[in-house]
């Protein structure tokens, strides 16, 4: 029986060589369409146009060319069914044993800044997914290839035949359904953004490609993998392979540093900031950030929002850390860090990117917008008798940027563009405040004249009073408690200025 392959690809990488091989070594005849047919013919590969094979012309600007019974019958026919084979013979339908199809580049098209809705619609592939799905459904008899990376092993399996070919067919069929599912998800998400203003969809379509399988998850007994385009946003220059926990920490560090425009250094551990500072130069910012907590950064993440130069590299070099993230590294800094072979250096542009946050829960997935709301001083209110001074305002706004990235209950004591003490993740807001004060004491940092930032309202006056006793002169918090009046009175009694933002920043 004649062996027939159908080849129609948007990405033509390696397709000429593949086609020559299956013709020369495996005796296939080739059906093809449009640009693929022209490319193969121009390179001396014998090819029959699909329109000549079906007796039906391509039409409607190529929208209709492979949607024909002679194509899908040849893909879906059960070779073991006498009825199927008889019907195929009656209608002149030949078998198609190999399908090589990849899809119109929909995601790449809509990612272009000048992409119009019409461009996007025309790049929704119809025939391609239809052929892939038909071939994959009948993978017991049909080999289906949707990725040029699979050409070499397909040729090898065709050479060996038997169970090796059957095993590859099963694997490639699964890949087809994963690929077409992701393709449909990209289309659905694009249209949701266009037609429904990117609101949370009725059906969640994820469709993220596998980036890498991790050695393990949070702990060695947990399997894990990374999906999406993380490796397009972050580029690793050196160091060990990233772990599951590294990636979580890197994401948290990136979100934090993107809050700041001035030269800033942030140090994180287990996604919580240990110390953050801004200054006109990164070296001084580093010294102030590190001074906040000199113990916790061991094994942590350091991120900066300017090119990391030699002076800062020399200062950091004596600290053991897992990852350093920067928009760039000078050659001198790279030379210094090259002596630490396991240290992971990551390049990231430090731009704030609003995104959807997903968390797995038993029985489902929670989805929310990222906490990237723009907050302006002009929209904040001061309910106390005393207004903050300009120096206090600077410290308050700095502390407010940091506290939104601290696990709740979160308290940050801050000074002029630097942290002084951070309390994270406690069951009581007072506990978090006490931890922050204790850490400042350990670091020998004076809280006199400091400000306090709280991610949620003070439910009682005791937290604010404790801050006043520690030396704070101003506070920033969302407000909105039924006891706001009590808290405001406590602030007034201690001559504290207090700012209500009207925005809460829980981080669970």
Image: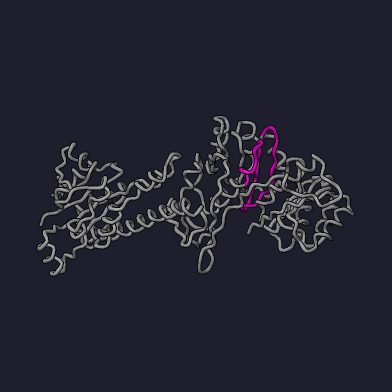
Q: Is residue 386 magenta?
A: no
- The spot of residue 325 in percent (x, y) is 57, 41
Q: Is residue 229 above or below residue 407?
A: above
Q: Is residue 262 magenta?
A: yes
Q: Which residue sits at x=77%, y=46%? A: 443
Q: Which residue sits at x=30%, y=51%? A: 146
Q: Is residue 230 left or right of residue 84?
A: right
Q: Is residue 462 left or right of residue 225?
A: right
The magenta segment is 256-281
Q: Is residue 280 left or right of residue 322?
A: right
The C terminus is located in which quarter?
bottom right
Q: Which residue sits at x=46%, y=50%? A: 194
- The spot of residue 181 in percent (x, y) is 37, 57
- The spot of residue 189 in percent (x, y) is 45, 54
Q: Is residue 419 left or right of residue 203?
A: right
Q: Say which of 178 and 50 sits in front.
A: 50
The N terminus is located in which quarter?
bottom left
Say whether residue 226 is visible.
no
């Amino acid at each position: 029986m004649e062996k027939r392959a159908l080849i129609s690809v948007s990405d033509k990488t390696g397709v000429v060589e593949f086609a020559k091989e299956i013709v020369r070594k495996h005796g296939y005849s080739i059906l093809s369409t449009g640009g693929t047919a022209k490319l193969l013919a121009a390179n001396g590969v014998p090819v029959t146009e699909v329109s000549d094979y079906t007796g039906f012309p391509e039409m409607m600007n190529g929208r209709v060319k492979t949607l024909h019974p002679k194509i899908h019958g040849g893909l879906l026919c059960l070779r073991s069914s006498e009825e199927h084979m008889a019907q195929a013979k009656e209608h002149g339908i030949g078998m198609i044993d190999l399908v090589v199809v990849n899809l119109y580049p929909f995601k790449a098209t809509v990612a272009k800044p000048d992409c119009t809705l019409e461009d996007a619609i025309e790049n929704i592939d119809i025939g391609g997914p239809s052929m892939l799905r038909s071939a994959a459904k009948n993978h017991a008899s049909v080999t289906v290839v949707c990725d040029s990376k699979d050409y070499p092993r397909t040729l090898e399996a065709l050479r060996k035949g038997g169970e090796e070919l059957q095993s590859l067919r099963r694997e490639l069929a699964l890949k087809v359904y994963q690929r077409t599912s992701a393709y449909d998800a990209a289309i659905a998400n694009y249209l949701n953004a266009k037609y429904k203003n990117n609101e949370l969809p009725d059906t969640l379509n994820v469709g993220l490609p596998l980036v890498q399988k991790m050695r393990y998850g949070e702990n060695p007994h947990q399997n894990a993998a990374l999906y999406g385009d993380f490796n397009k946003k972050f580029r690793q220059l050196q160091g060990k392979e990233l772990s599951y926990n590294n990636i979580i920490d890197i994401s948290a560090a990136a979100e934090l540093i993107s809050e700041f425009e001035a030269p800033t250094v942030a140090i994180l551990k287990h996604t919580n900031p240990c110390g953050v500072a801004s200054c006109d130069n990164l070296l001084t910012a580093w010294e102030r950030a590190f001074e906040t907590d000199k113990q916790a950064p061991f094994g942590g993440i350091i991120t900066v929002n300017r090119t990391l130069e030699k002076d800062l590299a020399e200062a950091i070099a004596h600290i053991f850390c897992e990852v350093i993230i920067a928009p760039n590294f000078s050659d001198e800094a790279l030379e210094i860090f090259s002596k630490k072979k396991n240290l992971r250096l990551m390049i990231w542009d430090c731009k704030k990117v609003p995104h959807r946050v997903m968390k797995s829960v038993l029985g489902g997935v929670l989805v929310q917008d990222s906490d990237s709301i723009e907050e302006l001083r002009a929209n904040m209110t001061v309910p106390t008798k005393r207004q903050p001074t300009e120096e206090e305002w600077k410290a308050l706004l700095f502390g407010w940027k940091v506290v939104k990235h601290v696990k709740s209950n979160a308290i940050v004591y801050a000074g002029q563009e630097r942290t002084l003490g951070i309390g994270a993740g406690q069951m009581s807001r007072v506990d978090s405040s006490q931890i922050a004060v204790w850490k400042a004491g350990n670091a020998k940092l004076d809280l006199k004249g400091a400000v306090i930032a709280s991610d949620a309202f003070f439910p009682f006056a005791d937290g604010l009073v404790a801050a006043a006793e520690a030396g704070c002169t101003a506070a920033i918090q969302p407000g909105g408690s039924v006891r706001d009046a009590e808290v405001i009175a406590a602030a007034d009694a201690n001559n504290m200025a207090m700012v209500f933002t009207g925005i809460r920043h829980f981080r669970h």
